[in-house]
Image (cartoon, rainbow, N blue to C red):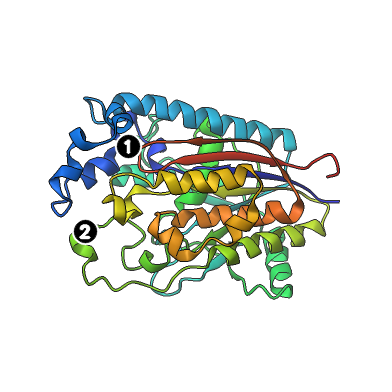
Amino acid sequence: MAHFLGLGLTHYPLLAGTDEHMASLLRWTLTDPDIPPERKDPAGWPAAMRDEWGDDQGVTAAAHHRKALVDNLARCRRALDDFRPDVVVVWGDDQYENFREEVVPPFCVLAYGDVEAEPFELMTERGSPNAWGLPDDTTITLHGAPATARRLTNGLLQRDFDMAYSYERRKDSAFPHAIVNTQLFLDYPSAGAEFPYPLIAITVNCYGPHVIARRGGLVRFADIVGEQTDPVGPSPARCFALGRAVAQVFADTDLRVALVASSSWSHAFLVDKNWHISPDTEADLRLYESLRNGDYDTWRSTTTDALLESGQQELLNWFCMTGAVAELGLELAWSELVLTDVFNSNKCFAVFQEGKQG
């Protein structure tokens, strides 16, 4: 009989850097000449945002933000260790990493063996030292479960879910940071070096219209004019259905399976209506309330347009996980939504466990 644990967490890249660099996305945004000056002036910001920005552009607040994230990650790790999984399935976005112009699948199972990855590659590119003071070229091993990944893919295909799969990582780009940072942050004290559990990544094309057009990254408003966008990614409903299907495949095994959604929630640099300055906190709070209430109908009925408007593209990873949670009847044991105006994205953490009947 299979057993399941659900986890939700952030893979916020700037947590891997130092406090001095944690608000660097907002600092870069404020240099955009096409953002109205009055929107960039802290004097016009809400009081909470001005307090977070402070007189040092968020450096002091970064330490408090880091503590909240690390404490919640530690709680997720304790739940994982108590559960003792045989395998950890992670839904994370591929942000112009493995998948580029040659092919962009909606979803892909990474049926890899052990992989060596450089967790600080993004920090090095941004000119930031890592938070652990380790060499920039430090590597960690992500343990794989290729045979189980193949069985999972086969089970999804047999359930009429047209799933792509990959046996080798792309050689000339960074390994998907959503997956690397999941291990890095769940093993925060050891910088990801001592994480013992095998991972199966299911990458999701969260960035859809911008995965190639913006290479899954930042853009100035002048660059948006006349932009040739890409096809949309999978819908929230389709991601929810994938989570259900993954749960069904594993339910026929005797494995202990942890199911992990890896992403922050709305991202400021994707929220055009907020001039890329702050996340869409109202939209995040609405979905969070539905999550706490177990209202998965609201999640499943969310539209792609709504996610794009609110900069919640990466939440598609959470739609996969909530589909699995709904299929399995897992109960929300704990959650917390860490709000911020300055550090790009609100971050949600959650633990879902089997009830007494599980």
Q: How many marks?
A: 2
What quarter of the picture does the C terminus occupy?
top right
Q: CA distance from mark 2 to mark 1?
A: 19 Å
First-in-chain label (2 vs 1): 2
Q: Position of residue 288 (x, y in %)?
A: 54, 44
User: 107 or 29, which lies in front?
Assistant: 29
Tell me which amino acid carries mark 2. Phe
Q: Position of residue 287 (x, y in %)?
A: 53, 48
**Residue 138 visible to an observer of this rendering:** yes
Residue depicted at 80% across the width and 57% down the height = 251
How crowded is the residue under tag 1: few (<14 C-alpha within 10 Å), some, or many (20+)? Answer: many
Left/right placement of residue 276 relative to residue 203 reads left
Tell me which amino acid carries mark 1. Val
Left/right placement of residue 231 relative to residue 89 reads left
Q: Secondary structure at mark 1?
A: loop
Q: Quadrant of residue 65?
A: top left
Q: Position of residue 84 (x, y in %)?
A: 74, 38
Residue depicted at 69% across the width and 51% down the height = 325
Q: Position of residue 129 (x, y in %)?
A: 32, 34
Q: Secondary structure at mark 2?
A: helix
How crowded is the residue under tag 2: few (<14 C-alpha within 10 Å), some, or many (20+)? Answer: some
Left/right placement of residue 103 relative to residue 318 reads left
Whether label 2 touches label 1, CB < 8 Å: no
Up the image or down, 131 lies above or below 294; here it is: above
User: 175 or 172, which lies in front?
Assistant: 175
Residue 45 numbered mark, or none: none
Residue depicted at 64% across the width and 54% down the height = 296
**Residue 166 visible to an observer of this rendering:** no
Residue beneath label 1, please? Answer: 342
Residue depicted at 34% across the width and 53% down the height = 271
Residue 221 numbered mark, or none: 2
